[in-house]
Image: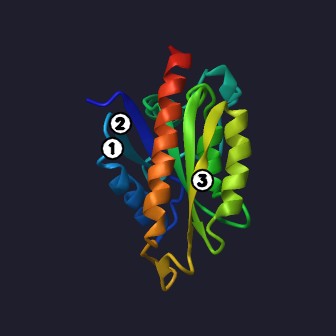
């Protein structure tokens, strides 16, 4: 039985996206972890229009059914791994929009970042770290960055270098440790 539940949030909905293979790799690598359950949450399954709630998310008074469904899903978890592409030196619009829909559901939980892009998606993660801080998401230091040049064959077939396995272990260790600690804050 797991005492911790972590969402791997796939932050791209583009046709032919590279992120699905990356998110599946993260979930696969997490499979042998004890006491924790990792679950893929694909934004394709939560089609949110541009933020359309009249009341600020910090109030928690969601009007739209799509917002309430998204809030219920995110509330299930103790932590998150955000899998993000880098678009124009930032994260994807669909991921930023999904994050902006909610507030309290993110608070006092742990977050980690996995990115991919021409420079490994590092700039997307830097933007997400600022957003996470505002949402009271405690983000861990370790991140995974996959280069379209070295970790993808022909920029599309995901073939990560071996060194990412060790880095993923560190990411999981940090995320789970913080996730457990923050459960006591929310108790």
Examine the rendered structure and indicate whether residue 166 appears above or below residue 132.
below
- Local crowd at mark 2 within 10 Å, few (<14), some, or many (≥20)? some
Sooner in the amino-acid sequence: mark 3 or mark 1 = 1
**Residue 54 percent across, percent down from the top left:** 70, 30
Q: Is residue 170 shown left or right of residue 115?
A: left
Task: Name the one closer to the observer, 158 or 93.
Answer: 158
Residue contact between numbered discs 2 and 1, judged by CB atoms under 8 Å: yes
Are the residues tagged 3 and 2 within 8 Å (C-beta)?
A: no
Q: Residues within 10 Å of mark 3 (few under 14, many from 20)?
A: many
Choose top left, top right, bottom left or bottom right for residue 5: top left
Which mark is on residue 36? 2
Which residue sits furthest bottom?
154
Quarter occupied by residue 86: bottom right
The residue that mark 3 highlights is 94
Report, in whole angstroms, how far the alpha carbon at label 3 lies from the one at label 2.
27 Å
Q: Position of residue 56 (x, y in %)?
A: 71, 28
**Front position among marks 3 and 1:** 1
Q: Secondary structure at mark 3?
A: helix
According to the picture, the residue beneath numbered tag 1 turns out to be 33
Judging depth in this view, the residue of 115 and 182 nearest the camera is 182
Cα distance in 3D space between marks 3 and 1: 29 Å
Q: How many marks?
A: 3
Q: Count neighbours of disc 1 (C-alpha within 10 A) and say few if under 14, some if 14 to 19, many if 20 or more.
A: some
Q: Is residue 47 visible?
A: no
Q: Image point 56% across, 46% down: which residue?
A: 112
The residue nearer to you, when weighing 42 against 81, is 81
Q: Is residue 27 above or below residue 184?
A: below
Extreme-left residue of the structure:
1
Per the image, label 2 sits on a secondary structure element best described as strand
């Amino acid at each position: 039985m797991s005492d911790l539940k972590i969402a791997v949030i796939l932050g791209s909905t583009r046709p032919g996206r590279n992120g699905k293979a990356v998110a599946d790799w993260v979930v696969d690598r997490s499979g042998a972890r004890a006491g924790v359950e990792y679950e893929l949450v694909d934004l394709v399954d939560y089609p949110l229009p541009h933020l359309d709630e009249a009341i600020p998310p910090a109030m928690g008074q969601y009007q739209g059914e799509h917002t309430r469904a998204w809030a219920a899903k995110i509330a299930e978890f103790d932590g998150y791994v955000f899998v993000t592409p880098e678009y124009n030196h930032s994260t994807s619009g669909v991921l930023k929009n999904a994050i902006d829909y909610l507030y309290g559901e993110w608070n006092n939980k742990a977050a980690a970042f996995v990115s991919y892009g021409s420079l490994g998606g590092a700039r997307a993660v830097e933007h997400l770290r600022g957003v996470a801080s505002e949402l009271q998401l405690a983000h861990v230091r370790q991140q995974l960055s996959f280069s379209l040049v070295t970790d993808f064959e022909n920029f599309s077939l995901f073939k990560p270098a071996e060194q990412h396995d060790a880095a993923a272990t560190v990411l999981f260790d940090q995320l789970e440790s913080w996730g457990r600690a923050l459960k006591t804050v929310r108790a």
